[in-house]
Image (spheres, rainbow, N blue to C red):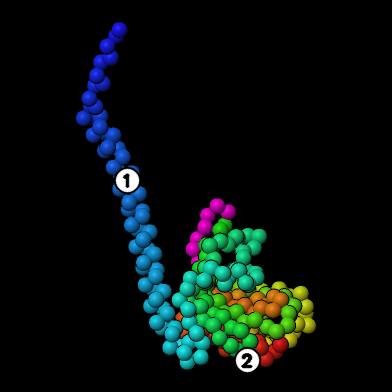
Amino acid sequence: MPVLADPAPPDPLLLLQLLSGLLPVALLVVGIVLLRRWGIRRQRRRTEDRAGRLAPWARSHRFTLELGPRPDLPGRFPGVPYVGDSLAAVSSRVAWLVVSGWLHGLPLHLFELRCRVWHGTKARPYVFAVAALTLPQPVPTLVIKPRWLPNALGPEMPLPQRFFAAFEVQVTDPAFRARVLTPGLMTWFVAALATGHEPWLRFEARRVLCCAVGTLRPDWADAMLSMLRGVHRTL
């Protein structure tokens, strides 16, 4: 009967080569995990800092402030940028810094919408400052959105010309548009653009939604509240 030979001991040089090949991969994985954790902690600290600045503002308006996250909240609202469109899908929608209260007896929410916007196979993270007012009755759909085109019209030009050069209006009911699109609302949009904001406004069903790219700050929250008060007077 043949006798099986003892297996040869592993070649130390071969083991060393194998380990040296795996080490960079292991270090890369560990580095990615640590970097992700650092990024999450850093984002959390920034959110808490903004919450500290928003808290006095919320109390002064008798609103409540919730740090978040609230992944359920964005799903209540229709339209771009909450659900995307034919050109850009939106995923991973989460609300942070949720301010809740009442405006003229109507439920009001302001929050930061964090999401990923997809263009084809590529996605970019975005943050939107959102104000949402819930109405007692449904209204026709009306959307005001920036054209994202260079606008060289100066303040000497008539207000409607400056407004329509910078913003597109989509509407299903011309009479509703005539009622809502007041000189005051056009002035608000043009002024917001001059301060670096590119706001959207959307009426749909029982919602009035305003948003702009950027974080939720007390000054911009005040600006959106002022606009919603003016809009409410036209409804």
Give the prevailing secondary structure in the magenta stretch: strand
Q: Which residue is mark 1?
A: 26
Query: What residue do we see at 27% from left, 11% from top?
Result: 3
Q: Which one is nearer the viewer's eye here, 137 or 190?
A: 137
* Residue lying at the far front of the rendered structure: 1
Q: Quadrant of residue 9?
A: top left
- Dot 1 falls on a residue whose secondary structure is helix
For disc 2, the neighbor class at 10 Å (few under 14, some 14 to 19, many from 20) is few
* Residue lying at the far top of the rendered structure: 1
Q: Amino acid at mark 2?
A: His
Q: Residue 62 at x, y = what percent?
A: 51, 91
* 92 lies left or right of 235: left
Residue 89 in view (yes/no): yes
Query: What residue do we see at 50% from left, 85% from top?
Result: 64
Q: Which one is nearer the viewer's eye here, 177 or 190?
A: 177
Q: Magenta segment, which residues? A: 120-127
Q: Residue 85 at x, y = what percent?
A: 64, 63
Q: Is residue 80 magenta?
A: no
- Dot 2 falls on a residue whose secondary structure is loop
Tell me the number on the disc at residue 104. Answer: 2
